[in-house]
Structures are given as C-alpha cells and as structure tokens.
Image (spheres, helix red, strand yellow):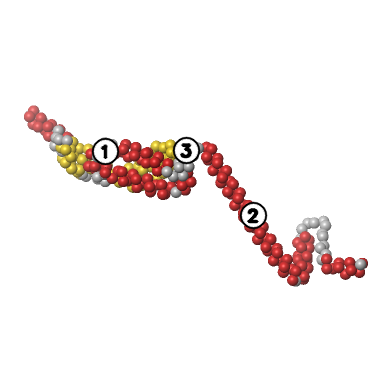
Amino acid sequence: MITTIAIIALVIVFLSVALRILKEYERGVIFRLGRVINAKGPGLIVLLPVIDKMEKVSLRLVALDVDPQDVITRDNVSVKVNAVIYFRVVDATKAIIEVENYSYAMSQLAQTTIRSVCGQAELDELLAERDKINSELQEILDMHTDPWGIKVATVELKHIDLPQEMQRAMARQAEAERERRAKVINAEGEFQAATRLSEASEIIGKNPVALQLRYLQTVNEMATENNSTIFFPIPIDMLSPFLKKKE
C-alpha cells in the first residue's frame, strides 16, 4: 500500500515537472544540459526533469512606452520627446540567446535612437514632419533588432514638449501671421471695392440719367427711415442755368 502511494506520488511529481502547456501566442525555448534544442509550442510540451529547462517567450505585439528624452535640435532648441514603440518577437530562439533582456535592450536602444534622430532635425521639421521622423526611427530600430529576432512594427512620437519661452514666441509668431493675413484680405477687399466704384463712375458718366435714378433711390432709402429731416439731393446740372444767368 505504501509502495503504491509512493509510486503515484512520484508519477504526479514527474508529470508536474515534465509537462508544460503553452498558449497559442507562446513559444518555449528548450535548453538541454545548457544547449538549445528547439523552440516548441503551442500545446503540450514534455520536458526531461533536471535535464531540460524551458524559457517562455510571448509572440504578441508589445507596446513599449519610451521615457521622455531631452533633445537639442539642429537649430539649438531644447525639447523633451517621448514615443511609443510597437514590436513583436518573430524568432523566439534568437530573442533568448542573442540578448539578455530584449525588452530592456529595446528601451535603451530606442532612447539613444530618438536623441540621435531628433537631434539632427530642426524644430519646425520635428513638429511638421512627424511621419518622416517616425519612419526613420522605425527603420533604424528594425535594422538593429533584426539579429535579436524582433520585428519593429511602428514607432510613434507621442509628445514634444517645448520650453515656455519658445511656446510664447511661437504664439506671437502665429498672431502676427494672422494679423498679416487679415491686413492682406482687407487691402484686397478695398482694392476690389475701388475697382467696382471706378467702373460704376464710368458707366454713370456715360449715362447721366443713371445718376438721377441713383439720387431718387437715395431719397427713397432715407424716407423709409424714421427721420425728422429729409435731404433732397439736387444735381448740379439743374443749377447750371441759374449760375450762367447770374453771370
């Protein structure tokens, strides 16, 4: 009886040590006496107790948040830049044996790369051409992490924090630009109005009757309002005979 119980206990211990179940997104890198055998999974994995050792690796997409980095742009402006990196492990064996901690290594590589790439760009380029900067960062990181069995999918700059004095200077510049546009639009409106008035004066000069009709229209507009005094415009042509007679 005792022997049977001991055997059952040994079997349970053996199974608990030897059997591993890996999920669909997991892979197990098997080391046998210190040598890499293979990457197995998903499903049921059988290990030799004491001899085999397994390291789990997730193949899911990882979002890595990079801490804000102090960057001096090419035009000598100090900014803080942080980013987020999306990557995944495509070769579990390389991710284990080529680098000690691929997440930490990716974070450190991303920090140095962000400082290098953003430091080569001017502030206006950094603010206006984020897609270009993101593509350059993604290409550089993917090239360096390829030997680690890691694929960098996307790099996105999240925030670019400017100094307070630079923010005020940019606000003044934007305000001056808006005032310039307003003055240009106002000048164009006055020019168009002057052009129309010039054309109207030429038409009225060729047709004196049109001027009389304009006088009557003005009187009609003034009469519709609640005015106690009404001014009647008299054309100069009506007074010219009296002026000649006086002379």
Is the residue under label 3 in contact with that under label 2 (CB below 8 Å)?
no
| Quarter occupied by the N terminus | top left
Query: Residue under circle 1?
Result: 99
Where residue 89 appears, as percent x and y from the top left, is 28, 44
Q: What element does badge 1 sit on?
A: loop
Structural distance between the alpha carbons of marks 2 and 3: 38 Å
In the figure, is residue 189 to the left or right of 151? right
Pair 1/3: label in front: 3
Q: Which residue does the numbered mark 2 point to in the structure image? A: 186
Q: Judging from the image, what secondary structure is the residue with disc 3 in?
A: strand
User: What percent of the width, then of the height, locates residue 61?
Assistant: 31, 45
Q: Nearer the viewer, mark 2 or mark 3?
A: 3
Mark 2 closeness class: few <14, some 14–19, many ≥20 residues within 10 Å: few
Depth check, front residue: 116 or 215: 116
Name which of mark 1 and mark 3 comes first in the sequence: 3
- Which residue sits furthest right? 246
Q: Residue at x 67, y 60 (%)?
A: 193
Side (left or right) of 151 relative to 21: right
- Res. 2 visible in picture: yes
> Looking at the picture, which amino acid does disc 1 mark?
Val
Front residue of 149/120: it is: 120
Q: Residue at x 39, y 41 (%)?
A: 116
Element type at marker 2? helix
Residue type at the position of mark 2:
Asn
